[in-house]
Amino acid sequence: MPGVQGCEAYLPNLAILVAGNQPQAEMAYNGLGQRLTTTAYSGGQDVTTQYVVDIACNGQPLMATAGGQTEFYLHGLGPPAGYATDWSYYLADGTRTIRQVADAQAEITLSRRMTPWGTTLAQNGEGSLAWGLGNFTRA
């Protein structure tokens, strides 16, 4: 698929984000369309994040685990905050994509710029956002 950019679906309940010839991420979903895992690829390494979702609440993640670190989430109309070792508050853009993370003192601890396909162009600060693309999970 030379030059392909975007999301390609190969199997039911699996989406693969592709840039050029390289997969950037794979997302696996349950039969209700709720994301259960995300595997991100970068520099020959991969990181898989597993989610526990609230089936009764549109599949909102309650918990995400990646690399031995687990984070829990609060919910409102979107994800207002997450807790790993301290509370982090998510700041989204108009498409509900998390672009910044603030700590309990309202200091920005992470800031990101992304392409329309969800590829990170630049990142400043500490942390990561594993869910990305219109959602949120940080693990």
Image: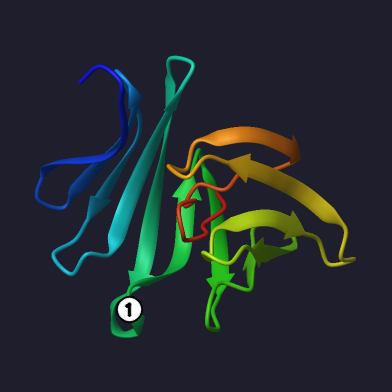
Q: Which residue is mark 1?
A: 58
Q: In this orientation, does residue 85 appear?
A: no
- Which of the 4 image quadrants contains residue 123? top right
Indicate the secondary structure of the residue bearing disc 1: loop
Q: Position of residue 104 (x, y in %)?
A: 83, 67
Amino acid type at mark 1: Asn
In the rendered image, the vertical position of residue 15 relative to residue 60, given as above or below: above
* 8 vs 33, nearest the viewer: 8
Coordinates of residue 94 in the picture (x, y in percent)? 58, 67
Specify the quadrant that holds the N terminus: top left
Which residue lies at the image location 43% right of the left edge and 15% below the top edge? 44
Q: In x, y percent, where is residue 122? A: 67, 33
Q: Is residue 26 above or below residue 134?
A: above
State left or right for residue 1 relative to residue 102: left
Snapshot quadrant of residue 46 = top left
Q: Nearer the viewer, residue 26 or 50?
A: 26
**Residue shown at 33%/73% (left/top)?**
59
Total labels: the figure holds 1
At a point 42% along the width and 42% down the height, the residue shown is 117
Q: Which residue is pictured at 50% across the width and 47% down the height?
A: 130
